[in-house]
Amino acid sequence: MEKVSMRIIKCDLCKKKIKGEPITAGVGFFPRTELCEKCGAPILNFLKKHKFIELKKIKKK
C-alpha cells in the first residue's frame, strides 16, 4: 500500500492555513518564511516599488 502525505502549509506570521501557493521570503543564509497573501502583501509591494522583482502570471494548462 502506498503512503500518501499531504503537506499543510501555515503562514509563519498569522498561523492560518494557506490555500494555494504561499509567498516564500528569505535572503541568503536566513531561514525562509512562508506567508499568506495578506501577510506577504507589504513585502511584495516594497519589492515592486523598488523594482527588485517583476511578477509573472503562470499559465495553467
Image (tube, helix red, strand yellow):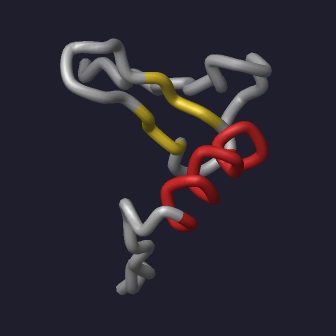
Q: Residue furthest front?
A: 50
Residue at horizontal 30 percent and vertical 18 percent from the top: 3
Q: Place residue 29 in its image quadrant.
A: top left
Quadrant of the snapshot with the C terminus: bottom left
Q: How many marks?
A: 0
Q: Residue furthest left?
A: 29
Q: Place residue 17 in its image quadrant.
A: top right
Residue at horizontal 36 percent and vertical 29 percent from the top: 26
Q: Place residue 30 in its image quadrant.
A: top left
On the image, the x and y values in percent for residue 35 come to 60, 34
Classify 38 as above or below 47. above
Residue at horizontal 47 percent and vertical 23 percent from the top: 33
On the image, the x and y values in percent for residue 34 come to 51, 29
On the image, the x and y values in percent for residue 50 come to 48, 63
Classify 51 as above or below 46. below
Q: Give the camera-side residue of 20 and 56.
A: 56
Classify 27 as above or below 56. above
Classify 16 as above or below 35. above
Residue at horizontal 44 percent and vertical 38 percent from the top: 24
Q: Give the camera-side residue of 19 and 50.
A: 50
Quadrant of the snapshot with the N terminus: top left
Left or right of residue 57, residue 30 in this image: left
